[in-house]
Amino acid sequence: MMKTNKLFFTAAILLIGLLFVNSEVFADNNTPKESTINAQASAEQTVIPDTIEISFTVETKDKNSQKAVDKNSQTANNIIANIKKILGENETIKTNSYSMTQTYEYNRTLKKSEMTGYLVTNGVSVKLKDKNKVSKVIDIATTNGATRVSG
C-alpha cells in the first residue's frame, strides 16, 4: 500500500512538473511570441464651464396649417434677430428642431376625436461664452413669444 502511494505521489509530482514546463521547449523557434499588457486608470477633474447652452421652443396653434407656420416663423425669427444683437464672437444661435402636427379634441357628443388644427414647434439653441448674457437671452426669448426654455 505504501509503495502504491509513493508511486502515485511521484507520478503526480511529475505530471505537475510537466504542466509548468516552459512552453518554449515545445514551440517552434520561428513562431512569434504574443504578449499582453493590461492597464487601467481613472482621473477626475473639476472645471468651470466655459460654454452655456440655452434652448427655447416656440409653439404656435392655428386651425389653418399655413397660418400656424407663418405665425411660428414670425415669432421665432423675431426672437432670433433680437438675440443676435447681443451675441459676441464665438457665440451662436441655430434652429435645432422643427415640427408640425395635427391637434385633436375629443367630441363627447359624437364620441370620437376630431381634428381641431395644427401645432407648429420650432426649437432654437443659443451657445454663449459670457455667462452674464444668460438672463438677457432668456428674457428676450420669453418676452418675444418662446413657450419653453431649458438648458
Image (cartoon, helix red, strand yellow):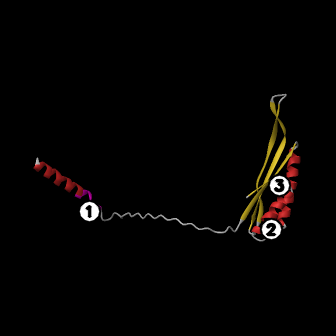
Left or right for 1, reference 146: left
Real-space Cα separation, disc 1 to disc 2, in angstroms: 73 Å
How crowded pointer 2 is (Cα within 10 Å; few <14, some 14-19, many 20+) is rated as some
The answer to which quarter of the image holds residue 13 is bottom left
Real-space Cα separation, disc 3 to disc 2, in angstroms: 18 Å
Residue pictured at 80% horizontal, 63% vertical: 135
Q: Quadrant of the C terminus?
A: bottom right
Question: Do residues under tags 3 and 1 come within 8 Å of each other at their CB atoms?
Answer: no
Q: Amino acid at mark 3?
A: Ala
Question: Do residues under tags 1 and 2 come within 8 Å of each other at their CB atoms?
Answer: no
Q: Position of residue 38 (x, y in %)?
A: 44, 63
**Magenta highlight range:** 17-24
Real-space Cα separation, disc 3 to disc 1, in angstroms: 77 Å
State which tag comes first along the sequence, 1 or 2. 1
Q: Amino acid at mark 1?
A: Val
Tell me the SS state at disc 1.
helix
Q: How would you classify the magenta stretch by its main secondary structure? A: helix
Residue 76 — which label? none
Residue pictured at 82% horizontal, 45% vertical: 119
The residue that label 2 is drawn on is 87
The residue that label 3 is drawn on is 146
The residue that label 1 is drawn on is 25
Tell me the SS state at disc 3.
loop
Query: Is 105 drawn above or below residue 143 in the view shown?
Result: above
State which tag comes first along the sequence, 3 or 1. 1
Number of numbered discs present?
3
Task: Answer whether residue 23 is magenta in the image.
Answer: yes
